[in-house]
Image (cartoon, rainbow, N blue to C red):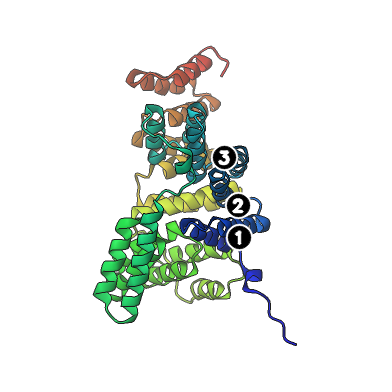
């Protein structure tokens, strides 16, 4: 008797998480719970699955358990903006505005270049962000909008299969009007643009699809092949390496990696033709490498981000920290100065730079930049730090 293993045996935590999100969007909450539970059974430290589970618990009125899930997600990855936003939304829905403000402020202090989260904080402080318990248990897009985007994407795929490419393109574009982050619509539109010879347009849509759903194999492979065709071989290699880290048993991914890594063609990385969103991806990659303690790998990723966008504030400041941790004093000071030129009114950056100057016995310079900052805008934190180093306790 031949026995076959269920396909479920081969599912990764990401597969269960995506399945749960799909069930949740369609209002199949019991099925969503089972999928999220499977994801967390395989990986108890999966922050996205914990946040999604918190939505279900909150929807059922189990507020304490929902808060515990979010708290655990925060402990695992306190620098994930989606985790922070979810936590804040739960606090607001529970009437705990001050707690919401505190958790978002703490995130911004660690990630002072996240303008979207700054705007989110302003909405909370102004009281313009009102979230009811039912809203806190929903996704960022309404279920109707997501369902409409799903329908249009499916219709576009049917039209594409019939050879009606123009109609398919309209469907995918309309889907993105309903859900601007719809990964499948971006991917499909990228394929059409690629076939039309618009490689740059295709790359932009593949990039958006990848950011929305980085674990999707089709999106990864389309992005990889488009990058190779555009001559961005090293970027393609980095992309497939990230995918292999999440899905190490994917033989096709390894074949693609070997195709680039073992090629006789010399790989010359070039920023030409890459959009600022790719620079953001390299900065995010650097953050993950830093968490693993790979300072040199992070430095390489940050240098590439800055070759694409020389004015990338986050990458500039992160590179200053990398050189600081590597005890490269001159390089660290140089990058801190560059970051200050780009964003001199950033409170957290000013304090961080002054703190480093003070540690290198450049107290006068530290006082100078703190004083310059206070002339532009009052800040209790900056004032306290200035007093601290002035009286010799810093």
* Residue sitting at x 37%, y 55%: 144
Label 2 neighbour load within 10 Å: few <14, some 14-19, many 20+: many
| Numbered badge on residue 147 | none
**Mark 3 to mark 1 CA distance (whole Å):** 34 Å
Mark 1 is surrounded, within 10 Å at the Cα level, by few (under 14), some (14 to 19) or many (20 or more) other residues, namely many
Where disc 2 sits, the SS reads: loop
Q: Is residue 209 above or below residue 3?
A: above
In the image, taking residue 4 as reference, residue 54 lies left or right, namely left
The residue that label 1 is drawn on is 13
Q: Nearer the viewer, mark 3 or mark 1?
A: 1
Of residues 394 and 52, the one drawn nearer to the viewer in this rendering: 52
Where residue 182 appears, as percent x and y from the top left, is: 39, 60
Residue drawn at x 31%, y 66% as measured from the top left: 172
Tell me: residue 56, above or below residue 261.
above
Q: Where does label 2 land, which residue?
A: 46
Q: Is residue 164 left or right of residue 315?
A: left
- Residue 63 percent location from the top left of the image: 58, 38
Residue 181 showing in the rendered view = no
238 horizontally vs 247: left or right: left
Query: Mark 2 touching mark 1, by CB under 8 A?
Result: yes
**Residue labelled with disc 3:** 325
Q: Which one is earlier in the sequence, the residue at label 2 or at label 1?
A: 1
Q: Secondary structure at mark 1?
A: helix
Q: Position of residue 383 (x, y in %)?
A: 45, 17
Say which quarter of the image contains residue 350.
top left
Is label 3 or label 2 in front? Answer: 2
Find the residue positioned furthest to the right: 1
Disc 3 from disc 2: Cα separation: 28 Å
- Image quadrant for the N terminus? bottom right
Residue located at (32% from left, 62% from top):
175
């Amino acid at each position: 008797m031949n026995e076959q293993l269920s396909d479920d045996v081969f599912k990764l935590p990401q597969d269960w998480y995506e399945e749960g999100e799909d069930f949740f969007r369609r209002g199949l909450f019991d099925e969503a719970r089972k999928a999220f539970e499977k994801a967390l059974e395989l990986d108890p430290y999966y922050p996205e699955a914990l946040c999604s589970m918190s939505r279900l618990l909150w929807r059922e009125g189990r507020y304490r358990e929902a808060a515990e899930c979010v708290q655990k997600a925060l402990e695992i990855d306190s620098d994930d903006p989606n985790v922070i936003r979810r936590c804040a939304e739960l606090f607001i829905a529970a009437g705990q505005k001050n707690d919401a403000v505190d958790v978002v402020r703490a995130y911004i202090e660690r990630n002072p270049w996240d303008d979207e989260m700054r705007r989110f904080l302003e909405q909370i402080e102004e009281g313009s962000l009102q979230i009811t318990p039912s809203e806190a248990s929903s996704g960022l897009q309404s279920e109707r909008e997501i369902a409409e985007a799903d329908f249009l994407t499916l219709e576009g795929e049917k039209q594409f299969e019939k050879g009606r490419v123009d109609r398919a393109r309209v469907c995918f574009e309309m889907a993105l009007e309903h859900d601007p982050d719809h990964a499948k619509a971006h991917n499909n539109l990228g394929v059409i643009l690629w076939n039309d010879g618009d490689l740059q347009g295709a790359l932009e849509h593949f990039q958006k699809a990848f950011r929305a759903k980085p674990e999707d194999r089709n999106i990864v492979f389309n992005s990889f092949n488009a990058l190779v065709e555009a001559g961005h071989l090293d970027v393609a290699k980095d992309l497939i390496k990230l995918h292999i880290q999440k899905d190490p048993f994917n033989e096709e991914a390894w074949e693609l990696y070997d195709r680039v890594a073992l090629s006789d063609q010399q790989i010359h990385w070039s920023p030409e033709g890459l959009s600022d969103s790719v620079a953001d991806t390299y900065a995010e990659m650097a953050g993950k490498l830093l968490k693993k303690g790979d300072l040199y790998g992070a430095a390489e990723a940050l240098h590439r981000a800055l070759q694409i966008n020389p004015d990338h504030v986050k990458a500039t400041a992160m590179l200053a920290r990398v050189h600081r941790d590597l005890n490269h004093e001159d390089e660290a000071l140089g990058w801190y100065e560059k970051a200050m030129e780009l964003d001199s009114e950033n409170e957290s950056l000013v304090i961080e730079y002054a703190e480093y100057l003070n540690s290198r016995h450049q107290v006068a310079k530290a006082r100078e930049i703190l004083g310059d900052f206070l002339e532009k805008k009052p800040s209790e934190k900056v004032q306290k730090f200035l007093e601290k180093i002035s009286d010799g306790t810093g």
